[in-house]
Amino acid sequence: MGKKVNPISFRIGSFYDWTSHWFGGSNKIYSGLLYEDVKIRRALMLKLRPAGITKIDIGRSINQVTLTVFVARPGMVIGRGGTGLEDLKKFIVTDLLKLKGDSKQKVELKVETVKEPNLNAQFVGQNVADQIIKRLPAKRILASTIEKVMTAGALGVRVRLGGRINGAEIARVQHSQAGVLPLSTMRANIDYASVPALTRSGYVGVKVWIHKKNA
């Protein structure tokens, strides 16, 4: 068995780009900004999970921080008349960013819609994790998920569960696959996500690979 490489990092530059766009300079500044990015992503991924959040892009310049949030249900983020967007921006400024009263630095928040959620590995993984937490049968979850992804137009999909599935006493690995998944081919557009599901018996790991058509 060869060493496994994350399909996203393996294809950065051909199909994917970095999710953070900024230059830190010295080690002290870089580590602070990196920690702030991690903090922002953890908080927003948890807060906007009902909206089907899939990715957060962070861009920084001298006097501006730009956050682009990709969600499947943008209406839940924007709210009526944009009130939800303003509340979210206020939460980011007051709780997540360390602006230290610098009025020159602005925060811009953008919301982008995910065109086909069932072809997004993060969205599919979150749905599988939510169903596992609700204690639905694993075989039924895998079968329905595979069917939805393939119906959406995927060339191949694999869903892998690892842990005490269905509350079993002994942890095991269970997976299901359909179509073709050429993970070693850089020309193949492979989307990947890993999502933990916290159940009463402990964590169940959910991994999703989706082979999409090249644009």
Image (cartoon, rainbow, N blue to C red):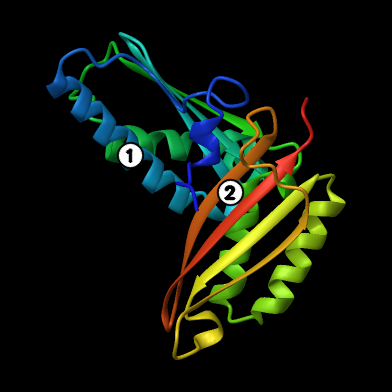
Q: Is residue 52 visible?
A: no
User: Which amino acid is tagged 2?
Assistant: Gln
Front residue of 135/93: it is: 135
Q: Which of the 4 image quadrants contains residue 186?
A: top right
Q: Which residue is mark 2?
A: 122
Quadrant of the frame with the C terminus: top right
Mark toward the start of the polypeptide (1 vs 2): 1
Front residue of 131/106: it is: 131
- Give the tally of numbered discs: 2
Q: Is residue 106 visible?
A: yes
Position of 206 relative to 58 (above/below): below
Disc 2 secondary structure class: helix
Front residue of 187/74: it is: 187
Outermost residue toward the front?
1
Which residue is painted at 79% across and 34% down in the image? 213
On the image, the x and y values in percent for residue 60 come to 37, 17
Which residue is painted at 47% across and 81% down in the image? 164
Left or right: 131, with 94 as reference point: right
Position of 79 relative to 62 (above/below): below
Determine crowd level at label 2: few under 14, some 14-19, many 20+ residues with C-alpha closer than 10 A. Answer: many
Left or right: 176, with 94 as reference point: right
Distance from the alpha carbon under mark 1 to that under mark 2: 17 Å
Outermost residue toward the left?
28
Q: Which residue is mark 1?
A: 38
Q: Which of the 4 image quadrants contains residue 64?
A: top left
Which residue is painted at 61% across and 54% down in the image? 208
Disc 1 secondary structure class: helix
On the image, the x and y values in percent for residue 22 come to 35, 16
Which residue is painted at 42% across and 83% down in the image? 201
User: Which amino acid is tagged 1?
Assistant: Val
On the image, the x and y values in percent for residue 87 come to 45, 39
